[in-house]
Image (cartoon, grey):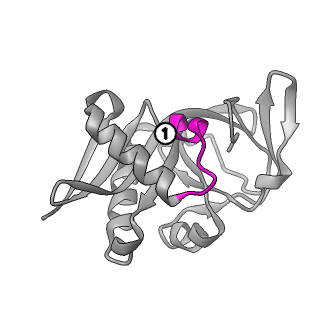
Amino acid sequence: MVELVTAHTSALDRATRQAVRALLFEEFDDMAEEDWEHGLGGVHALVREDGVVIGHASVVQRRLLHAGRALRTGYVENVVVRPDRRGRGHGAALMEALEAVVRGGYELGALCAADDAAAFYAARGWQPWRGPLAALTPHGRVPTPEDEGEVFVLPGSLPEAVVLDLDGHLVCDWRDGDLW
């Protein structure tokens, strides 16, 4: 039996957290402890098959600066589906659950897509950010051109006065590890 569950990090038991972490580290060669931690503290979507975690994604709150505003952003992290279970709609189910969270609770959704996942997100209505990217770091605002072309956004509950300029500047808040 396949089931989709959503829960805050605080509601995940230790075994579930360990299963998700193991899946991520197994599937991503460049996965680091900071990457794992980036996905904690928000809402998780899990796909389980016969009780075994086969897919995961989470959305956490971040602040992104755009057009003179700090936007409350639901940032999607740690999206994974076991390779032998891909192509069955599990990734779409994970994203549908998190997109509902973004639209209901955040002004904007954002994520950094791997090259092989960009078309998947674009087909779901996520828009590639075309403008320059930067991060607010302990050393001030630092451009992050290496991430350009990989950041996607999804309008959430933006105030009417805010118009996204996909060619404008987008600045993320500081965190250890990968900034985007």
Residue placed most toward the observer, 76 or 85: 85
State the residue in front, 42 or 169. 42
Please identify the quadrant where the N terminus is shown: bottom left
Q: Which residues are magenta?
A: 28-39
Residue 46 vs 62, above or below: the answer is below
Q: Secondary structure at mark 1?
A: loop
For this view, does 12 lie left or right of residue 98? left
Query: Left or right of 46: which side holds 173?
Result: right
> Camera-side residue: 122 or 32?
32
How many numbered discs? 1
Q: Quadrant of the C terminus?
A: top right
Q: Residue visible at 50% across and 50% down?
A: 25
Q: Is residue 103 visible?
A: no
- Please check the rendered image and state whether residue 32 is part of the magenta-colored stretch, yes or no: yes
Q: Is residue 44 magenta?
A: no
Q: Residue at x 73, y 53 (%)?
A: 165
Q: Residue at x 41, y 53 (%)?
A: 23
Coordinates of residue 144 in the picture (x, y in percent): 82, 46
Q: Is residue 125 left or right of residue 100?
A: right
Residue at which label 1 appears: 39
Q: Quadrant of residue 146?
A: bottom right
Residue 162 point in image, percent of width and height: 63, 42
**Towards the viewer: 152 or 161:** 152
- Identified by mark 1, the residue type is Gly
Q: Is residue 7 above or below residue 98?
A: above
